[in-house]
């Protein structure tokens, strides 16, 4: 069976990536800051209400597959960092798009361009589509383009890190750098 991430682990990973890119002065995150980030009501879909225990379980799940580690920064309290960029060899623009997909689910290229603005500034919609194409052509792919829904004029993209039926997870068999 292919390993996939639980909804809580997806939320934690998305929050860690988002906070690193959008507010680097507060990154790595303490447990309390991570709980608050996971429970944010804006820019999250679905909205979750997680406690410390839920977040600790999600962190353990991510630690087992080496996507999260405890930082040596901050002597007074434990802080957490993600290792998504290093493990999957991702650039900042790719991380920004993945963070939004992890936090909000399926998105159109236009929505992604708007919602990544604080993390990475794309020059135009074409540059977003270029990065999306690159992420979908990786081996294994990190995102897929969903079929166009009736009544919608644009395709949506979704990450492949979350637990979904009939989707192969790109994390299987990866070794840390």
Image: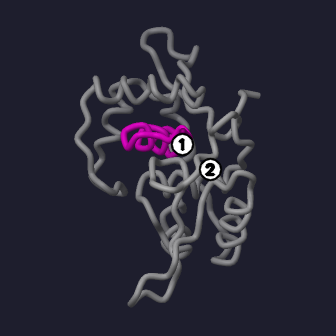
Magenta residues, start to end: 1-19
Q: Residue at x 53, y 18 (%)?
A: 70
In the displayed structure, would residue 88 be above or below residue 67? below
Q: Is residue 124 left or right of residue 166?
A: right
Helix, strand or loop at mark 1? helix
* Between 32 and 49, the one nearer to me in the picture: 49
Q: Is residue 6 magenta?
A: yes
Q: Is residue 177 left or right of residue 65?
A: right
Numbered label tally: 2
Give the position of the N terminus as an image quadrant. Answer: top right
Helix, strand or loop at mark 2? helix
| Residue 25 x, y percent position in the rendering | 53, 35
* Between 79 and 2, the one nearer to me in the picture: 2
Q: Read off the residue under disc 2.
A: 95
- Residue pushed farthest top? 75
Which quadrant of the structure image shows residue 46? bottom left
Residue 17 bears which disc, if any? 1
How many other residues sit within 10 Å of disc 1, few (<14), some (14-19) or many (≥20)? many
Q: Residue at x 70, y 68 (%)?
A: 133
Q: Residue at x 49, y 57 (%)?
A: 101
Q: Residues at badges 2 and 1 in contact (C-beta under 8 Å)?
A: yes
How many other residues sit within 10 Å of disc 2, few (<14), some (14-19) or many (≥20)? many
Q: Main secondary structure of the magenta part?
A: helix
Q: Is residue 147 left or right of residue 57?
A: right
């Amino acid at each position: 069976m292919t390993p996939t991430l639980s909804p809580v682990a997806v939320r934690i990973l998305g929050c860690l990536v988002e906070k690193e890119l959008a507010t680097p002065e507060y990154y790595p995150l303490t447990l309390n800051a991570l709980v608050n980030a996971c429970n944010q009501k804006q820019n999250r879909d679905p909205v979750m209400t997680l406690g410390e225990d839920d977040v600790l379980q999600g962190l353990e799940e991510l630690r087992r597959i080496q996507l999260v580690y405890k930082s040596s920064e901050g002597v007074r309290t434990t802080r957490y960092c993600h290792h998504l960029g290093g493990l999957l060899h991702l650039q900042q623009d790719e991380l920004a798009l993945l963070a939004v997909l992890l936090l909000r689910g399926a998105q159109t290229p236009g929505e992604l361009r708007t919602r990544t603005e604080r993390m990475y500034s794309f020059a135009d919609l074409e540059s977003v589509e270029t990065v999306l194409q690159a992420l979908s052509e990786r081996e294994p792919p990190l995102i897929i383009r969903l079929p166009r829904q009736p009544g919608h004029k644009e395709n949506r993209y979704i990450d492949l890190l979350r637990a979904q039926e009939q989707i192969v997870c790109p994390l299987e068999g990866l070794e840390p750098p």
